[in-house]
Amino acid sequence: MSDGSDDRSRFTHFHFGHEPEPAEPTPGTLAIPHPGPLSPRGMLIACARCEATRDWLLVHVHPDLVFVRCRCTHEWREPDLEARDVAAARGENFEEREWSSFEEMYRGLGFDGLFHGTYLA
Ligand SMILES: [Zn+2]
């Protein structure tokens, strides 16, 4: 049996402000770097801007949108990729990190254009 003060403090975070709201503007967004080429339906994915064919950032946006981002910062929705493809690219050693914004995430992962073309070297 816990005393009453413990119970009150446990629930105080529901009481400030108004109704509880989701803190994250983009719930369920998952970004996974994918260094290799991708050919989800036998068609090799290539960047329309710089013609790169690998070194992608896969971005899964809740609930079932998948975007591919290139090192040159070109980004598009890829309907041939599904959420499970992103999850499969995740691997076992993926280090979870939280970002406060897409810009910060892109910078942190090196997809802000700084490494544009470096994969060719
Ligand atoms: Zn590109």
Image (spheres, helix red, strand yellow):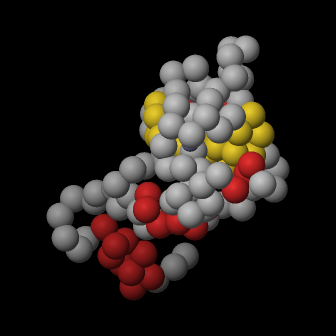
Front-most of residues 25 and 89:
89
| The image quadrant in which ligand 1 is located | top right
- Quadrant in the rendering for residue 62: top left
Where does the C terminus fall, quadrant-wise?
bottom right
Where does the N terminus fall, quadrant-wise?
bottom right
Expressed as whole percent of the image width and height from the top left, the position of residue 55 reads 69, 45
Expressed as whole percent of the image width and height from the top left, the position of residue 23 reads 35, 61
**Residue depicted at x 28% and y 57%:** 21
List the single residue furthest toward the right.
92
Q: In this view, does 7 lie above or below 32?
A: below
**Residue depicted at x 39% and y 50%:** 26
Expressed as whole percent of the image width and height from the top left, the position of residue 63 reads 45, 33
Q: In this view, does 99 lie above or below 65?
A: below
| Left or right for 22, reference 61 | left
Q: Can residue 93 be seen in this view?
A: yes
List the single residue furthest toward the left.
18
Front-most of residues 71 and 94:
71
Q: Can residue 59 be seen in this view?
A: no
**Residue depicted at x 64% and y 43%:** 56
- Quadrant in the rendering for residue 111: bottom right
**Residue depicted at x 50% and y 50%:** 73
| Left or right for 52, reference 23 | right
List the single residue furthest toward the top.
42
Q: Is residue 71 above or below residue 17?
A: above
Front-most of residues 49 and 23:
49
